[in-house]
Amino acid sequence: MSTEPIADVTDDAERKKNRFQFDRHTPEYRERFTDITGEMLGKCPVAWSDTYGGHWVAAGHPEVFELARSAEYVSNDHDPNNERRGYKGISIPTPNVGFRGGFLEMDPPEQRHYRQALNPYLSPAAVARWMPLVDEVVRASLNEKIETGEIDFVDDLANVVPAVLTLAMLGVPLKNWDIYVEPVHAGVYTPPNSPDIARIQQGRIAMREDMLRQLAEIRANPRPGMIDALARAEINGTTPPDGELLGVIALLIGGGFDTTTALTSHALEWLSQNPDQRARLSAERDTLLDPATEEFLRYYTPAPGDGRTITADCEIAGQQFKEGERLWLSWAMSNRDPAVFPNPNEIDLARTGNRHHSFGLGIHRCIGSNVARMVFKRMLVAVLDRTPDYVCDPAGAEHYQTIGVIQGMKHLPATFAPGERIGDGLDETIARLQVVVDEQRLAEPITVRKGAAEIS
Amino acid sequence: MKVHVDRERCQGHTLCAMIAPDVFTLDDVDGHSSALDGEIPADQEAKAAEAIRSCPEQAISIIP
């Protein structure tokens, strides 16, 4: 396949002959995902859809691979004030928000400057330092429910741990996690016409106020963390305005919270439905945990895709595009391409050659991928150890109605044989961990602090 | 067998080091991969081949 500029694109009817009425925001798309994906992969791995003002949809694995890695022709830029070319960022349709979603809605060089500032907090070595703290939050979260024999894996575990860790890495007080968790989680799955939207808006305002307060506090009185890195960052030689930094902090929070929650809840649901596979995973975790994690990532693709804008007339992956056209890169559909994944609609915990696209590809690869993997694995292993016989209640399991933004779950109640608490509960643990974070300056970048958290 | 990671293509997905930790090393600061210099031990060749197959960016190649 080639990527090249072209002088003359052929006429639209010819270019857009592969058509598919694609609307990922409908419940039908979630319910018929396997069929729709099979149809697109078979007939039109790149198709034109008339929905949302018209846009391309890339579903095939090789096509998504080429397009996502063609940063010179494919832009993430969101330019709501029309200061450059008026591009619309990564959401299709464009939400009516008027600000950029952090560096995921930027192109290089700004995007690269942000990532260079944050990489030392998010590299595999940097993330591994947090594992003892994560284990404490997991232990304490399970303590809250272990004696009752009942848990909601979303509300009581998978929503809590990623939130607490993300705030710790940002440099925000851990106890503030409950300001953030509900607006982020419910904000993703609640449709704009829901009667609940006013409550979520209130939550979002409180979250935004806290982000601004933290940024101001850290500027006045620095403490380590990613917010400190952003407050000091030179992006293209200047300090970005607070509004832009808020977009970056919101991106880190949005990326850090609900995606890992979504992956964990889906994996726990599947393991409840497949107890033999659960027993196998637990027994063979030394060799199976890594490939099983990649397989859950592939199959459930928590962030199912990203939008882009074509920056010049070009031909990529055998398809001609025109400057300004919108494009949806479907990580989720490309993850089911039978040309790359034998039996793509089955979960194979030991799958090899798993080149999935769940963290995206190219220069925008999810910067939090190492956090997601580590937190997921620590939650999963703890559940296998402390509630090995859990059974999810199918009547109570509630999936997001649509998977246009995040493929997640609202609730996943389960029962299990009650067990004993180990150590203290969540609030006491979080208070104790705050002291550890502060005294050991855990949120420093790897360039400053190499050692893991020490928890007595 | 010798392998090479193309630093321009590598985006720090880390799968290679997860699959073949004795062959690939990740940079502490940005997580990008580099391969062992020289000949890969015979007992690591299968893992190195699986890492090549699994790289999402197809950034790893065998040096002829």
Image (cartoon, coloured by chain):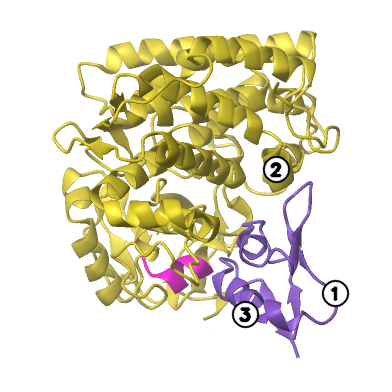
Asked where in the image residue A268 lies, by quadrant, the reply is top left
Q: Which residue extends farthest left?
A: A395
Q: In the image, what residue type sits under mark 3?
A: Ala
Q: Secondary structure at mark 3?
A: helix
Q: In the rendered image, which quarter is residue A405 located in? A: top left
Q: Secondary structure at mark 2?
A: helix
Does residue A235 sit above or below A423 in this rendering? Answer: below
The quadrant the C terminus of chain A occupies is top right
Q: Amino acid at mark 2?
A: Arg
**Residue occupying the point 54% across, 24% down:** A137
Alpha-carbon neighbours of circle 1 within 10 Å: few (<14), some, or many (≥20)?
A: few
Q: Which chain is tinted purple?
A: B
Tell me if mark 3 has few (under 14), some (14-19) or many (20+) residues whose alpha carbon lies within 10 angstroms of its own: few
Q: Which mark is residue A115?
A: 2
Foreground label between 3 and 1: 3
* Residue range highlighted in magenta: A59-66
Is residue A327 visible in this depiction of the protein? no
Q: Which residue in the structure is indicated by mark 1?
A: B37
Q: Residue at x 76, y 91 (%)?
A: B64
On whether disc 2 and disc 3 are found on a single subunit, the reply is no
- Which residue carries the number 3 mark? B46
Q: Nearer the viewer, mark 2 or mark 1?
A: 1
Whether label 3 touches label 1, CB < 8 Å: no
Q: Residue at x 27, y 59 (%)?
A: A49
**Numbered disc 1: what chain?**
B
The chain drawn in yellow is A
Relative vertical location of residue A202 with respect to residue B18 in this rendering, above or below: above
Q: Is residue A43 visible?
A: yes
